[in-house]
Image: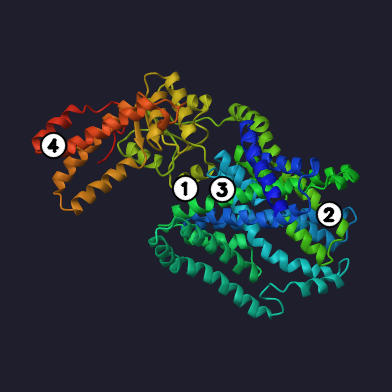
Amino acid sequence: MDSLLFEAFIYLAAGVCAAPIAQKLGLGTVLGYLAAGVIIGPLLGLVGAEAQRLQEFAEFGVVMMLFLVGLELEPQQLWSMRNRLLGLGGLQVGGTALVCWVVAWLVGTPWTVALAIGLIAAGSSTAIVLQTLEEKGLMRSDGGKASFAVLLFQDISVIPILAILPLLAIHGLGAETATAHDAEKGLRLLDGLPVWQTTLLTLLAVAVVVLGGHFLTRPLFRFVAGAKVREAFTATALLMVISIALLMSLVGLSPALGTFLAGVVLANSEYRHELESDIGPFKGLLLGLFFITVGAGIDFSLLAQHLVLVCLLTVGLIVIKAAVLWCVASLFRLRGSDRWLFALGLAQAGEFAFVLLSFVGQNGVIATEMARMLTLVVALSMLVTPFLFIVLDRLILPRMTEAQARSEDQIDVVGVAIIAGIGRFGQIVNRLLRSHGYETVVLDLSAETVDTMSKFGIKAFFGDAARPDLLEAAGIGEAKLLVVAVDDREHALNIVKYARQRRPDIHIVSRAYDRLHVYDLYSAGSDDIIRETFDSAVRAGRCALEALGKHPHEAEKAVGAFVRRDRRSLLRLAELYDPDIPPMQNQPYVDLAKRIRAEEDQMMTIKGAEKRNEIDRAWMPPPVTDKADDA
């Protein structure tokens, strides 16, 4: 027990120290955890053989992460990804496996061993890549979406890879070991069954996950939530994830794939946010533990014996995968930073390679010494990945931006309005302006969105509206209006700041995420600031008043009064907001918010419509926020 407590103390202390330090240095938490594992393992020797066992346990963090990713995707979104899922994912896995197979065979490796190496090298680290993309806010970029599609396909491809690898033992290094290993696989439900029964049970397991998630989880969560015991709901959420992972393992499927499907099924559930908040901490802890065990498991004695060879193999693996990814990205028209993100972000081997290497070693496909060597290569490629992201951020992207500035396509449209962002928000503004005869210049950072708009006859230009040269080419010097409709908070602020500095007289309309974002945009110089959900929420409130018996005219007047009061309070609070102080620690801000709430409560006690109207007229609407609401 003392040993267990000591090990728990070491791992938790390493994680607590590593994450904040690495984040402050701008290195990312993944690199911090990996470095912490190296320190407490090979360097100080505080942890030993249990690191491998802990790694198998910590890999469950990947399962939880894919469940949470699935919660963010509706089935329609997943279906819309099918081309990228099969195209990008299929070409990447097939291309990487083929190139690695050929290279390994050319250097004298038997073709069966070379094929096994190629299949193992085809995967990438779901844990590292998704964690890094989330930290950097890149999941919504074209490169981030493409990377996610490839990672999802790689999880699916594990199924046929696991079926192929044992067949290679027939011509491999020791087929007799496969028989012994088969005798040990008693936990798998499908061992020894005919193919048709295996297929049927596999499809049945997937159907249980999909149908159970749709029809059974809601009554279950409703029953547990009715008890109003928070830990019971958390335990139910964990039980569901573990049960699905166990079912998938029993039928030979990837547990991560099963929980991802369950997450997609529950994406529209009313319990989605509760599930995210309950499982999120466990996911973060287990992923951190996983990265620490990877660092702790690096065999430095073997590395010292074969330093040059291991380094060459690691570099060769990264170069081959990056080259294949670059070619695949080019075929699918990923451009600029998205192509670099895609190529370098997925250039490492994946965590599932540890499982596959153990599997092929036990099945006699690859010799034990070679399996140990390749395990070290996999670990080092994962350790190098955070540095690749640093190289991408600090070296490649700045130079590429300069090169793009010199070779930027000339914008051949002159308009009175510039619209930055042509997503679901910006395209409505664009349609409204053009329907009244105003010429617009549309910019968007997503090449996929620009291409999609062009298919519908909407002309847009690919580029970053935060770049001064692109705004100049778009006509910022002559335009009368700038609409900032991007969905990234910092990106929107950068655009507004430059535009206001360049053109003090231009009218700027900005899209805001929430109230705090309104304050930042107001300070940056935006004229009109529209909270993206405010107008729709006000309209919903008006409908609610009518449903409760208010006359439509009376409900309309009540909504109008509410909007005017909200505008006034927003302006008053904006003047006290300090971005360097959290709102709850800004005492003048808190005091004013309380006074405003008391004033609103006092308004509710005033009798008579005439008196209300008189007070409403005293609330002067400010010139800067939510001018264009439709309520």
Image: 499 above or below 200: above
Secondary element at image label 2:
helix
Side of 477 relative to 397 (left or right): left
Residue position for label 2: 372
Whether 542 is drawn above or below 184: the answer is above
512 relative position to 163: left or right: left
Residue where numbered disc 1 is placed: 455
**Residue 569 visible, this orientation:** yes
Q: Quadrant of the N terminus?
A: bottom right
Mark 2 / mark 1, whichever is N-terminal: 2
Q: Nearer the viewer, residue 372 or 531?
A: 372
Res. 606 mark: 4
User: Cα distance, mark 1 to mark 4?
Assistant: 56 Å
Q: What residue would you read off at disc 3?
A: 145
| Count of number-bearing discs | 4
Tell me, yes or no, whether the two marked residues, 1 and 3, touch with CB atoms within 8 Å. Answer: no
Q: Secondary structure at mark 3?
A: helix
